[in-house]
Amino acid sequence: MSNKDEISENSSSSNIAPTLKNAWSIRSCSLYKDEYDNCTSIKARFHQYFVDGENTDCTQWKTDYDNCIAYEESERRDVTAGEAIIKSEQQRRETRMKAHYGNTTWKKRSSPPDDWSKPLPEWLTKRYENSYLKLKQMELEGQLPVEKESKSYCTIM
């Protein structure tokens, strides 16, 4: 039995990686490292202090990076590390969307307005008549002949 046969037999029986719910939310490990490096850079620290008055805690990015390495690069995926990353990403999403869901100023729609596709006002249509985009649209639709751009490479020295 060759070495290749042993590897294929082993990979088919013992290295089956368990799948996690919401595993799609796990980013590439290099992104967690980049976020940590960016968070701890001097430029970012200065910005954090200027905007927030204190430095941001960057340990979660480092923890996520370590968990990602444990999850992605082990022979059998470390399920607890993967679940920790998913939980961290979920908390990050909830924090980001907190203002959106807490907004009581605007009424949220479930469908577009009835007149969303009505024609443009006449003044805007006239303004659009001779625009570059209108001419290009007419060329694409075959209403105008395609103009070949002539470029001059004449140089006077």
Image: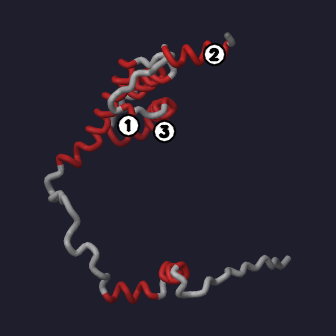
Picture residue at 48% right of the left edge, 38% below the top: 43
Which secondary structure lies at badge 1?
Answer: helix
State the CA–CA distance, disc 3 to disc 1: 10 Å
- Amino acid type, residue under disc 2 in the picture: Asp
| Dot label at residue 43 | 3
- Amino acid type, residue under disc 3 in the picture: Lys
Are circles 3 and 2 on residues that touch, CB within 8 Å? Answer: no
Q: Nearer the viewer, mark 3 or mark 2?
A: 2
| Residue position marked by numbered label 1 in the rendering | 49
Q: Quadrant of the C terminus?
A: bottom right
Q: Residues within 10 Å of mark 2 (few under 14, many from 20)?
A: few
- Amino acid type, residue under disc 1 in the picture: Tyr
Q: Is residue 148 visible?
A: yes
| Residue position marked by numbered label 2 in the rendering | 5
Q: Nearer the viewer, residue 32 or 38?
A: 32
Residue 65 position, x and y percent, is 45, 25
Q: Nearer the viewer, mark 1 or mark 2?
A: 2
**For the view shown, which residue lies furthest in the right direction?**
157
> Closer to the N terminus: mark 1 or mark 2?
2
- Count the labels in the image: 3
> Closer to the N terminus: mark 3 or mark 2?
2
**For the view shown, which residue lies furthest in the front direction?**
1
Which secondary structure lies at badge 3?
Answer: helix
Depicted 2 relative to depicted 93: above or below: above
> Closer to the N terminus: mark 3 or mark 1?
3
Q: Is residue 41 visible?
A: no
Which secondary structure lies at badge 2?
Answer: helix
Q: Residues within 10 Å of mark 3 (few under 14, many from 20)?
A: few
State the CA–CA distance, disc 3 to disc 2: 52 Å
State the CA–CA distance, disc 1 to disc 2: 58 Å
